[in-house]
Structures are given as C-alpha cells and as structure tokens.
Amino acid sequence: MAALQDVGPDGDTIDVTAGWLRGSLREVDEAASRPGAPALPCRNPQAIPLGKDVVYRIPLVPNARRFKAGHRIRLVLPTRRCRHQQPEHGSVVVAAAAAGARIARG
C-alpha cells in the first residue's frame, strides 16, 4: 500500500490518493505502462526473495490537487497492515515524487 498525503503547516493531514500492490504480483507490463502509471497484469505470481532488495512499483489512483504554499507532500509506505492515516502505527518511508522536490523527514 502507498498513500499520498497533504500535510499542512499545523501537521493536519489529508489523504489525497492511494494505491495497492500484492507483492507477489509485482510484475510490470512495460509496453502497457505510462510514466508514473505502471501496468500490472497480476497474472504471474512471483515469490518474494528473503534477504534481497525488491522493486515495487505501486500505481496510485490518479488525482488532481493543488498543494498550498507551506504544505508538504508525504508518501506513506507502511511496513505492516496499519491505518495509513496515522504513520505512528507502522514504519513509513517519506519520499519526494518530483524532480526538484525536497524530501521531508519526520
């Protein structure tokens, strides 16, 4: 699961969009994919190798939103089943999604 959030200066968080991926069905059809929108055929399950890095391309539901000045964009990737609205319930990774974007920590 991945959730994109709008974080206001006061810390209030609004969910903007989300996406889901079953790890074993991570194969991407590159020919059918578009930039930022991987096509997942979900037909060929693959075991998740233990102790190795695995690339997951999680498609987010398309959404148009203008972020106000002073707000941050947070991408939440929970490491276990948890409520994505509350990062303290699971480990999260915070990432920048666009060239030139700053990465927010914390």
Image: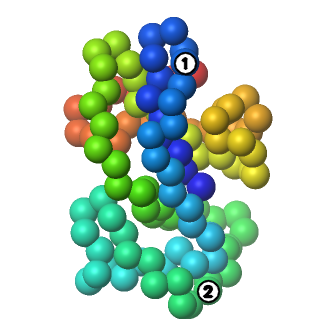
Q: How is the rendered protein coloured?
A: rainbow
In the picture, the disc for residue 12 is 1
Viewer-side residue, 66 vs 23: 66
Residue 4 visible here? yes
User: On the rendered structure, is 90 left or right of 66?
Assistant: right
Q: Where is residue 33 in the image (x, y as percent from the top left)?
A: 29, 74
Viewer-side residue, 44 vs 19: 19
User: On the rendered structure, is 85 left or right of 5?
Assistant: right
Nearest to N terminus: mark 1 or mark 2: 1
Q: Where is residue 36 in the image (x, y as percent from the top left)?
A: 30, 59
Q: Report which quarter residue 31 is drawn in.
A: bottom left
Which quarter of the rendering shows the C terminus? top right
Give the amino acid type for the residue marked by disc 2 in the picture.
Pro
Q: Do the residues labelled 1 and 2 touch (CB within 8 Å)?
A: no
User: On the rendered structure, is 30 left or right of 91?
Assistant: left
Dot 1 crowding, Cα within 10 Å, few <14, some 14–19, many 20+? few
Q: Residue drawn 57% across and 78% down? A: 25
Q: Residue drawn 53% across and 83% down? A: 42
Q: Report which quarter residue 20 is drawn in.
A: bottom right
Residue 75 visible here? no
Dot 2 crowding, Cα within 10 Å, few <14, some 14–19, many 20+? few
Q: Considering only vertical position in the picture, is 61 above or below 99?
A: below
Which quarter of the rendering shows the N terminus? bottom right
Q: Position of residue 91 (x, y in %)?
A: 69, 38
Q: Where is residue 9 in the image (x, y as percent from the top left)?
A: 45, 11
- Which residue is identified by label 2? 45
Toward the bottom, the furthest residue is 43
Helix, strand or loop at label 2? It is loop
Q: Residue drawn 45% across and 17% down? A: 8
Give the amino acid type for the residue marked by disc 1 in the picture.
Asp
Mark count: 2
Q: Considering only vertical position in the picture, is 91 above or below 32?
A: above
